[in-house]
Image (tube, grey):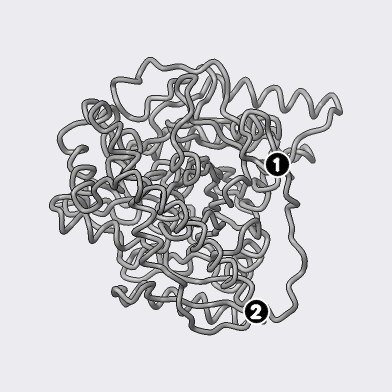
């Protein structure tokens, strides 16, 4: 195995640390050196947690030397998006208004990762308030750059973690997703991500004592990014399970009942028939061939009620969002506001009767998707139907904004029904990573992870990568 510890997977680091082959302090030092070397090129890590990371690593080494039991992620560095609470570190959401908001306690997933021995090494960038579009740029920290092509977006909203993981600054990142915010940066940066089922992992995004509205309770989930599917599985086992801090989290077994084989996989290269880039289609076809070679029964199919799911998703989430927009909009720059205003123009808030009706529509669509997954336990499709766009064209006009967000329609639809998914890379085309996603029925993360591992065994991994220097841009 390569002697540079920052290149190792989380699983390899945890195993070597537990055996005493490397120390947690050596692992942390290697990643801090990599951050110092690489972050100036990509601007993914916003706040370095060097002192606390070294202290946590020393504690892991002390416990191992004393013969105390170590967690499954002992000594493994991870990053945390700046809208997830880390005790003693500001949760800024990327805007000046929250630069001094320092939580006293970790959010549930951070707490669980620490208990498993993982070491937080840095906070990561995100779009302003996680609502200012799909490009990771914030008022406080500026733009994060795609390591494959700095002229293109790294995606968002968990783009900081996607870039940090892709470039070897950490083997794991903790982000979140309410419509593609884990899968998109995974696909655009050549790494893997797990979006869990709604209720699989506990979380808590409250800033004060009040809880958010219905759509903000139903759609967002926290989840990991990693370079290997095995690492996603490891974190999945650490994060899953109930927690009194989040009554949505349920005690569902990690693995569901066996599916009579061969497992049928529905392939949807162009969700909804709205168009797909040839390189994206080629990635889906490569993943389908890998699954077929692994013994899966692969066949083309149509996603049930896809466009209706996307429309209902927008109707619920943007109606609720419109209520807070007069206050929230004042925290954003004019550029950041543009995306929201264009989106609200295309998806204006609905009246109360329509909102209530849409909650029923959601149940019906969930039922139809559940029936679909009875026939096809897995759905294979693109994360985005287009290549990573250029930041200046993503939200520059209403048409650009609609095209950018329309490309991730399969992410929005699966978010609407609460289904789990694994995004993973399947190759490189034109110098850019190709990414796909495998979506499963509720609480069947195990099927998604197993299938993703089968694809990975045949097509390999792409990262860590050395960033293409931004200075090479014209």
- Quarter holding residue 335: top left
As drawn, is 317 to the left or to the right of 469? right
Residue 155 seen by the camera:
no
As drawn, is 275 to the left or to the right of 271? left
In front here: 323 or 4? 323
Residue at numbered disc 1: 241
**Picture residue at 37% right of the left edge, 60% below the top:** 310
Residue at numbered disc 2: 294
- Residue 425 image offset from top left, x and y in percent: 48, 64
- Residue 187 image offset from top left, x and y in percent: 42, 59
Label 2 or label 1, whichever comes before in sequence order: 1
- Disc 2 versus disc 1: distance between alpha carbons? 30 Å
**Picture residue at 17% right of the left edge, 42% below the top:** 338
In front here: 101 or 375? 375
Label for residue 362? none
Q: Residue furthest right?
A: 67
> Badge 2: how crowded within 10 Å, few (<14), some, or many (20+)?
some
Q: Residue furthest front?
A: 353
Q: Are marks 2 and 1 in contact (CB under 8 Å)?
A: no
- Quarter holding residue 37: top left
> Badge 1: how crowded within 10 Å, few (<14), some, or many (20+)?
some
**Picture residue at 68% right of the left edge, 33% below the top:** 243
């Amino acid at each position: 195995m390569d002697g540079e510890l920052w290149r190792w997977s989380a699983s390899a680091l945890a195993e070597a640390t537990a055996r005493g082959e490397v120390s947690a302090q050596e692992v942390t030092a290697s990643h801090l050196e990599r951050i110092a070397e690489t972050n100036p090129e990509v601007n993914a890590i916003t706040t370095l947690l060097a002192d606390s990371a070294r202290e946590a690593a020393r504690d892991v080494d002390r416990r191992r030397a004393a013969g105390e039991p170590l967690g499954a992620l002992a000594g493994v560095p991870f990053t945390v998006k700046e809208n997830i609470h880390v005790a003693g570190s500001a949760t800024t959401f990327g805007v000046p208004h929250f630069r001094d908001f320092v939580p006293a306690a970790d959010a549930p997933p951070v707490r669980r990762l620490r208990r498993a021995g993982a070491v937080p090494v840095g906070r990561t960038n995100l779009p302003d308030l996680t609502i200012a579009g799909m490009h990771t740029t914030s008022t406080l920290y500026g733009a994060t750059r795609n390591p494959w092509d700095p002229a293109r977006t790294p995606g968002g909203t968990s783009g900081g973690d996607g870039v940090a993981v892709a470039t070897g600054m950490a083997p794991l990142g903790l982000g979140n997703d309410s419509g593609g915010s884990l899968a998109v940066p995974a696909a655009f940066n050549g790494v893997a991500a797990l979006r869990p089922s709604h209720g699989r992992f506990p979380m808590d995004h409250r800033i004060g004592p009040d809880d958010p509205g219905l759509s903000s309770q139903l759609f967002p989930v926290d989840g990991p990014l990693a370079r290997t599917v095995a690492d996603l599985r490891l974190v999945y086992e650490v994060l899953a399970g109930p927690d009194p801090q989040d009554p949505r989290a349920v005690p569902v077994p990690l693995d569901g009942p066996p599916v009579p084989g061969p497992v049928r996989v529905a392939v949807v290269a162009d969700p909804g028939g709205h168009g797909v880039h040839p390189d994206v289609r080629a990635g889906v076809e490569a993943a389908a061939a890998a699954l077929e070679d692994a013994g899966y029964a692969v066949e083309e199919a149509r996603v049930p009620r896809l466009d209706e799911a996307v429309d209902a998703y927008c109707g619920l989430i943007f109606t609720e969002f419109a209520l807070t927009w007069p206050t929230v909009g004042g925290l954003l720059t004019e550029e950041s506001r543009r995306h929201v205003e264009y989106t609200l123009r295309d998806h204006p808030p609905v009246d109360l009767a329509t909102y209530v009706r849409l909650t029923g529509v959601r149940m019906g669509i969930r039922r139809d998707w559940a029936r679909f997954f009875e026939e096809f336990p897995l759905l294979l499709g693109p994360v985005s139907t287009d290549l990573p766009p250029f930041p200046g064209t993503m939200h520059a006009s209403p048409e650009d904004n609609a095209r950018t967000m329309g490309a991730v329609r399969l992410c929005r639809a699966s978010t609407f029904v609460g289904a789990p998914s694994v995004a993973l890379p399947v190759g490189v085309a034109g110098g850019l990573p190709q990414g796909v996603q495998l979506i499963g029925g509720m609480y069947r993360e195990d099927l998604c992870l197993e299938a993703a591992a089968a694809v990975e065994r045949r097509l390999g991994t792409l990262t860590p990568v050395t960033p293409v220097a931004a200075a090479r841009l014209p």
